[in-house]
Amino acid sequence: MQWRALLLGLVLLRLGLHGVLWLVFGLGPSMGFYQRFPLSFGFQRLRSPDGPASPASGPVGRPGGLSGPSWLQSPGTGAARGPRQAPRRPGPGMCGPAHWGYVLGGRGRGPDEYEKRYSGAFPPQLRAQMRDLARGMFVFGYDNYMAHAFPQDELNPIHCRGRGPDRGDPSNLNINDVLGNYSLTLVDALDTLAIMGNSSEFQKAVKLVINTVSFDRDSTVQVFEATIRVLGSLLSAHRIITDSKQPFGDMTIKDYDNELLYMAHDLAVRLLPAFENTKTGIPFPRVNLKTGVPPDSNNETCTAGAGSLLVEFGILSRLLGDSTFEWVARRAVKALWNLRSNDTGLLGNVVNIQTGHWVGKQSGLGAGLDSFYEYLLKSYILFGEKEDLEMFNAAYQSIQNYLRRGREACNEGEGDPPLYVNVNMFSGQLMNTWIDSLQAFFPGLQVLIGDVEDAICLHAFYYAIWKRYGALPERYNWQLQAPDVLFYPLRPELVESTYLLYQLFDEDNPVHKSGTRYMFTTEGHIISVDEHLRELPWKEFFSEEGGQDQEGRSVHRLKPHELKVINSSSNCNRVPDERRYSLPLKSIYMRQIDQMVGLI
């Protein structure tokens, strides 16, 4: 009977979740747009902040013709015009104002204007209720995982027991790419426990991870998933423990000796073989944590999977003073970037890592590409490398030129509200008429660069779909105005964009009160933004053309075929292990260590 009670509880929780989301999005005055936002080509004009909505667009013809909606027209269709200009974008080398403007030195309207316009939509009493309900939902899930599933990776709610990799079916990638037999849910939840202020459970969970989790497993995992879920959480929790300000309460661990950082290092070393024996520098998609890249490994990978490792690998490198991890991740980003179309500046979604040939030529904002764009900007925010911002600005301009359809401005002008479509990377021509739920991250990214008005407008589109179905379908066909793929796997992208647009839901949380600037990774792990992560102790050792060290000695430039890594069975190495690295990588790495401790 216990499993039946738990199942009933999960059903009630799901219904409660939908109720919460309805309350969050459906109560109170409109947040700058019509509550009845119809899903039709004649979308009503979004309400301006200071007055009523403009008249809705008139009738339109059938899709496909010149009289049809502008979403179906290529950028060059209709009146002669040049490439679309990104609305209200700062010039190259400058990041926009708004949410991160103050971090990057930008100037903008500041938070007060938007707070004034939208604060009435979510009154304090409702915020408190939703905060407590969200906290209770997390506790319910976490407690049941610990009671019924730990130390396995996750809880199977139907059978009320834990599960890990599908050993019987290696081709079951939906499970095996993510579950590595390393207590995934426990590791993934560490920083959430801290943000919620539960210091006792956080400290208990950290000790459990240190004492029970090992990466010396015969598990083949996806490099991207292991990086954003496990590596990212270990780094986030380590930063929380070692933060001298302790904004979330006392999250320190007695006798903590950087164990989580060393575990992150151990995991990252086990992922490094993915970067070996690839002619382009783009990594293999999967790696066995014991033996390296499987002999039958696929040579095809998605752009997001290969190009969204820089945040976690870069943080690890800068905390350890070891450039290896950031170097391989940055090399992959540059390799992908150099494969973009010369005509459109767009990238495809699937590439062959040996030939550099685009297997998937679709360019969009959803699956296969989403976090690539996200991490170009977030890498700049964290590390301050100008080339990251330059790549992002160029990518954003190409997105505006070729993917954005509809009128130029959200709240003025003729035509349909903006929509970002899927196109051919080489021609910019429309490839299909669907969007996927992963694209809902983009309004949040627009907040980070200061395009807040456009972010509000695009968010309203996804919200309208959510309000119609009570969830965001995995794929939605905007031409047929119906879902293409009917399931909803609890994706967080729309929630993240909502959070970034409408801070704050939990106004008193230390995330917003501590004075420390925080950023979330693509998996939702929290990272403090500070100058320490902008330091490059190895700068003189690694350059594109090689160079000299501080004493004028020649420094060898690492070549792709020279990167050889030997896996170690050690779970937690307190000092760099020379046996992990074969020459010349070992000698360069150890020289960096010597340089930092003043031995050279």
Image: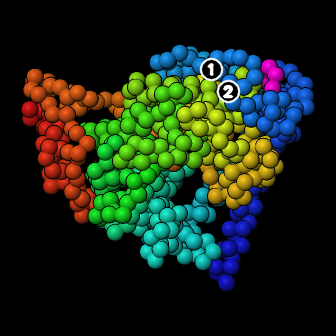
**Residue depicted at x 52% and y 51%:** 192
Q: Residues within 10 Å of mark 1 (few under 14, many from 20)?
A: few
Q: Residues within 10 Å of mark 2 (few under 14, many from 20)?
A: many
Tell which residue pokes out farthest to the bottom in this image.
Answer: 1
Query: Is 209 placed above or below 599 here?
Result: below
Q: Which residue is mark 2?
A: 75
Q: Nearer the viewer, residue 318 or 83?
A: 83
**Residue depicted at x 69% and y 70%:** 9
Q: Nearer the viewer, residue 412 or 296?
A: 296
Number of dots carrying numbers: 2
**Residue depicted at x 82% and y 41%:** 39
Picture quadrant of residue 187: bottom left
What whole-number distance in Å separates the C-alpha atoms at marks 1 and 2?
7 Å
Disc 2, SS:
loop
Q: Where is residue 548? Give x, y as percent.
A: 15, 25
Q: Which residues are magenta?
A: 410-415
Which amino acid type is marked by label 1?
A: Pro
**Residue depicted at x 59% and y 19%:** 89
Q: Where is residue 297? Give x, y as percent.
A: 37, 60
Quadrant housing the N terminus: bottom right
Q: Nearer the viewer, residue 184 or 80?
A: 80
Query: Is 341 placed above or below 524 here?
Result: above
The mark nearer the N terminus, 1 or 2, is 2
| Viewer can see residue 477 | yes
560 sits to left or right of 64: left
| Viewer can see residue 199 | no
Q: Which residue is mark 1?
A: 83
157 sits to left or right of 461: left
Residue 449 shown in magenta: no
Which amino acid type is marked by label 2?
A: Pro
The reply to whether dot 1 and dot 2 touch (C-beta < 8 Å) is: yes
Q: Where is residue 59? Give x, y as percent.
A: 91, 31
